[in-house]
Image (spheres, helix red, strand yellow):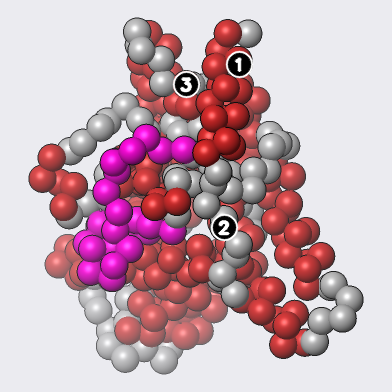
Amino acid sequence: MNINGLIEYPELLLLILAPIFYFFMMIEWYVVKKKSKIILNAQYHLPEVLCNFALAAMHQLADLLAGLLIVKLYFYFFDWRLFTFEMTWHYFFVLIVAQDFCYYWFHRASHRVRWLWAAHVAHHSSEIMNFSTAFRQSLLYPLTGMWVFWLPLVLIGFDPKWVILSVLLNLGLQFFVHTQMIRSLGWLEWIFNTPSHHRVHHGSNPQYIDKNYAGVLIIWDRLFGTFEPEKEPVCYGITQPVQSVNPLVVTFKEWLNMWREFGSQGLKMGQRLTVLYLPPKKHSIHRQQKQERDDRYIKEKVD
């Protein structure tokens, strides 16, 4: 497919990149398996991988269906644009940076607003960190309003299909930060989101919770006070584990919890709304929980 075809159907980008993703997963699987010092929470476990693949397929299908409506909405608002940009490589670079800025705020909101967290938590619920974790996405992103965060780019004057392509390219690049095989990238750590930075983001260690929201550029975290370097080993997952590899449970458990709280007896409407929009409860993980996780990984490896 040439560039014109990709612009016409930007939603196909991740499908086109899929063989590259699978290639890197196979390399990582082989390296982890052959390492003399085994990284237990980087191992590929078949039930976990199948769950991640199922979540990715559900997410992709939801995006394709919702995208039909979202594109129409974008083009409706595009008629109200402030400027008109003829897309050149210069403007595409500006779009990529602007989109990454919008992604930072979407990602930050997804951790600080429970309505958004109910979808995003699926991505964080794994206690494993490897390339397959990047596939762990929610089909409910369109429902929560993810698309709203890129609407300003359309209103400024960027063609909606180029905006969607830039979003998907950003997400595709983020696949490569979901690994423990790369420890540091030197001076690039100052500018770009790297595996080290993103490992922190997936940590439930007290100092790692709600840090490093970057998509491609870590500069937004450094500018807005949400950056945290990787120091102690990361304990992956969430502080209230899902404890399931059923993709439906992973997708809907937090939604069910949220709606149960929303429907609790004796709450006034204002209190019910706070259940939806206040930050989710993320208690710092207890050391005993961390030890129990580590013991479980060791037992699985022995078995």
Q: Is residue 31 above or below residue 64?
A: above
Which of the 4 image quadrants contains residue 117? bottom right
Q: Which residue is mark 2?
A: 282
When asked about the image quadrant of residue 249, the answer is top right
- At x 44%, y 63%, the residue is 107
Which element is circle 1 on? helix
CA gap, disc 2 to disc 1? 27 Å
- Local packing at callout 3 (Cα closer than 10 Å; few below 14, some 14-19, many 20+) is some
Task: Find out whether the residues at labels 3 and 1 contact each other: C-beta distance under 8 Å.
Answer: yes
Specify start and end residues of the magenta stretch as a single range: 210-235
Query: How far across and down, in percent of the image, does residue 176 sit?
Result: 34, 39
Q: Which mark is residue 196?
A: none
| Kind of residue indicated by mark 3 | Leu
Percent x, y for residue 114?
A: 61, 67
Tag 1: amino acid: Glu
Q: Which residue is mark 3?
A: 40
Amino acid type of the residue tagged 2 in the rendering: Lys
In 3D space, how far apart are the residues under numbered discs 3 and 1 (Cα atoms)? 9 Å
Residue at far right of view: 265
Which is closer to the viewer, label 3 or label 2?
2
Closer to the N terminus: mark 2 or mark 1? Answer: 2
What residue sits right under mark 1 in the picture?
Answer: 300
Q: Secondary structure at mark 2?
A: loop
Of the image marks 3 and 2, the number of the one nearer the N terminus: 3
Q: Is residue 224 magenta?
A: yes
Q: Where the C terminus falls, by quadrant?
A: top right
- Which circle, 2 or 1, is nearer the viewer? 2
Q: Residue at x 47, y 79 (%)?
A: 75
Q: Is 20 situated above or below 284?
A: above
